[in-house]
Amino acid sequence: MLLSHNKGENNPEIHGLAWNTFIEVTEKVSKPLKLYGAGQDILKGKEAFSGNVKGLGPVAAEMEIEERPSEPFIVLATDKAEAGAFNYYLFNIFANPMNTAGLIIDPAMHNGFIFRVVDVIENKFIELRTPAEMHDLLALIGTTGRYLVEKVYRADDHLIAAVAGVTRLSLIAGVYKGKDDNACIVRLQYGLVALGEALAPFATPYLTKGWMRGSHVGVLTPCSIKSSAPSYFDGPPRVVALGFQLCEGKLIGLDGNQPTDLFADPIWEVSRRKAMEISTYLRQHGEFEPERLGMDELEYTGITKILEKLKPRFKEIP
């Protein structure tokens, strides 16, 4: 669900509209059609809403802005991927000069960006400035299951450049309730990254946790909206990129408010073929690590019941 409004971040009215829409569609459409897993990402009942969807299941990525003379942006959305899957991409987009030429040649970006990183275990955040603190940043966000990039700001004036969701369903629910399926918004041009700089990192198929039953490593594959439905082993993990222009609060696309489907470009077929080759190689590992996640990552899944069943059968080694 993509909304533009003038009520600011974390507004109860806007969050209530989103929450009630999720509940109504679940109850009146998905469940009557007997769709599998209908409502599994809705962790609590309608009465649990208290002004914000955060903590109730849905991922929220919000930014409050003042419109620039030109305000293009992209919305990235994943399926079968962990919440921290955007860490790799946001780092390359905003901190890697080998990817983003603007860091070198655009004076507005030359002094770098500030990354707000959330520790989802301790529920704390830290802000790190690049390039000065690049190594400290990588020390954290390489651990994609714990340290998640939530926001990126331009260092010179703290202009918001990107925002991503930082919700991990299993940490909220205590059990596996579906993968996190994150979303990210990236502002473009006019003193920020170009569209091509924002998309270029996706040419490299990135390994992410969250494939099949949320228990396997898969390859995040750039795909069009039409080809975004999972198939092979319930995947592979997918990411779509939707391009918009914001004009006086309204979302403008190629055809009215319909977005530009950026990964529909045939040039991305090269990345998709590579992603599929890696995917079939990973599946040859079957249920062995590192293709299947380690036990620390599986503690929220049904395998815990299997382990409990087997536990009494273990004997002390003399």
Image (cartoon, rainbow, N blue to C red):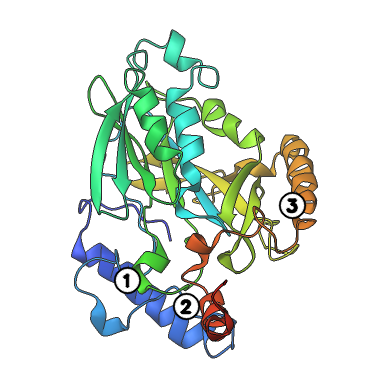
Q: Are marks 2 and 3 in contact (CB under 8 Å)?
A: no
* Label 1 sits on residue: 56
The disc, 1 or 2, on the residue closer to the chain's N-terminal end is: 2
Mark pair 1, 2: CA separation:
11 Å
The residue at the point 26 percent across, 54 percent down is 122
* Label 2 sits on residue: 40
Tell me residue 115's x, y (percent). 32, 33
Tell me residue 67's x, y (percent). 29, 35
Q: Disc 2 on helix, strand or loop?
A: loop
Work out whether 215 lies above or below 25: above
Tell me residue 201's x, y (percent). 58, 32
Name the quarter where the C terminus is drawn. bottom right
Q: Which of labels 2 and 3 is toward the front?
A: 3
Instruction: Farthest residue to the front: give it.
Output: 318
Instruction: Count neighbours of disc 3 (C-alpha within 10 A) and say few if under 14, some if 14 to 19, many if 20 or more.
Output: some
Q: Amino acid at mark 2?
A: Gln
Work out whether 72 lies above or below 131: below
The residue at the point 33 percent across, 25 percent down is 113
Residue 282 is tagged as 3
